[in-house]
Amino acid sequence: MSVPAVQFSEDQAEAFDSVSEALRGVGVDVDQGVLTPRADGQTSRVLAVIGKAGSGKTLLLAKLYEALQEAGVDIVSGDYEGKRRKDRRTLAILAPTNKAASVLRNRRVPATTIHRILYTPVYDPEYEKIADWLAGNGERPTVEGLTDAALDRAFAFYQSNTSIPGALAAAGLRGSDFILGWKRREDPLDIGFVDEASMLDAKQFEDLQEIFPTLILFGDPAQLAPVNQSGQMVFDALPEKRKLILHRIHRQAEDNPILDLAHALGDPDVGFEEFERRVEQLAARDARVVLAGRVEADLMARSPVLVWRNATRIRLIHAFRNAYGAPVDELLPGEPLICDGIELPLKHRKKRLDLEARGLIKGAQVIYLGPGRKPGFSRLHVMGAEDPQVSAASIIKIELPDEEEPFIPFAANMGAAFLHGAAVTIHKAQGSQWENVQVFAPDLWAAARMGRVEAGQPLWKRLAYVAITRAEKRLFWVVRNRLSRPTAPLSVDDLRVAPTPLELTAQEQAP
């Protein structure tokens, strides 16, 4: 077949052809632009595109998406699915976390989270007419309470940004106006691309196989496997013929010293001391790598320090709060948080789904903006979410050094639970990326001294690989247990956005 007009390596071109052949076998011919209806009862078909950082997995995913879209395949998002047709072929592009999905969206790939595909919005029938019209599946509607000018604004918004909620917001509506609730998906979809597949656990993989007859996984075998999976990733169990291996492409790495360090970890002769010497040598000639004698408090407000040990994480969090003069009984606007799950009883399942659908899933990075209108509620900015600003009942937990129970400065009776996010474990950071990343090297040295091995690789090397590859532009390799003083007070000015349709102010009526 003719490879897209992009500089593919030989193994990328082979992977593109292999995926295209698999899609042709299920009735989607991207070469000829011919689609045939999906056959009922089709058994699950899974392929994995596997490669380390810099091997071009994201580029390949993006080009496959473009080819499918050009062939006429409909893209399914977590916001709106449209009416089903027998001859319709669909693609959903998924990631395990909001941050991982936002990395793809920044590259103009319309990704959503796995959760948003497993649970779908239920639209008010009146406003669903607008959604159908915007998506090209109906005539321009007449809706009571909406003027022609409002519909024109919605249409204009949708032409430049294919977001149904965003378009309805441009018409003056809020999410609580047009989304009645959320339900577990019952009907299968079609083709699914899953990025950061190394993070999938067995249950998520099983759920996806029930929904998607065709699954293409994109994963990095050098990352950390999900907890409780004995160092194994879901694609490890696939037959070899179902694994498409990409090798590192130096041309695409653009002489990136961060990737150079990550790939140096694959050398079995490189121990911790030798690796740290390489960090020092690179730092001496390239500003993108910094051998740091202390943790920078300013950076912690938006990108957490990555650590291995929980005790280290808790100490750094308290040092951060002390440096900014944060009171023990309240949060300052601008403090980072990590969602630790939703604490709601089963009878409030709809409210749980509302919160999770808006990005408050376990592991989500959040910035505290200030108190909500009711006691126990918080205004929050969900990093990486398409509609980031929400207000929700919150339970804030700040863990204390050498204490089993966390300190809770304030809390609603039930709602979204949060831990402080100035520092996180490398496991929890997997799937996220930040411009600047600080890696706490003394923790990795401790892991190296313990001599632990995971799936045939020294644990410290897997930890270092994941931590290093979280950095997009600059890596700080912190060698001492010190914290700098912040250069300015905490602020939320960099997070200010226009109000969005999915703000949760209506949730303030929750128990």
Image: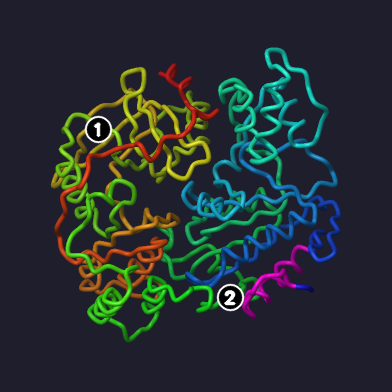
Q: Is residue 477 above or below residue 99?
A: below
Mark 1 Cα shell of 10 Å, populated few (<14), some (14-19), many (≥20): some
Measure the C-alpha gap from mark 2 to mark 1. Answer: 47 Å
Instruction: List x then y, in percent, for residue 296.
Output: 22, 55
Instruction: List x then y, in percent, for residue 90.
Output: 74, 49
Q: Main secondary structure of the magenta part?
A: helix
Name the residue at 36% across, 22% down: 372
- Locate the C terminus by quadrant: top left
Name the residue at 63% across, 60% down: 62
Mark 1, residue position? 331
Residue 40 appears left or right of 265? right
Mark 2: secondary structure: strand
Residue 387 appears left or right of 447? right
Mark 1: secondary structure: loop
Pick out the residue farthest to the top.
Answer: 145
Residue 15 part of the magenta-drawn span: yes
- Locate the N terminus by quadrant: bottom right
Q: Which mark is residue 245?
A: 2
Proximity of marks 2 and 1: CB atoms separated by less than 8 Å: no
Read off the magenta span: 3-23
The mark tally for this picture is 2
Instruction: List x then y, in percent, for residue 96.
Output: 51, 51
Q: Of the two numbered discs 2 and 1 on the same chain, state the one appearing first in sequence.
A: 2
Name the residue at 33% across, 35% down: 368
- In the image shown, does 387 or 487 lie closer to the viewer? 487
Q: Is residue 352 above or below residue 305?
A: above
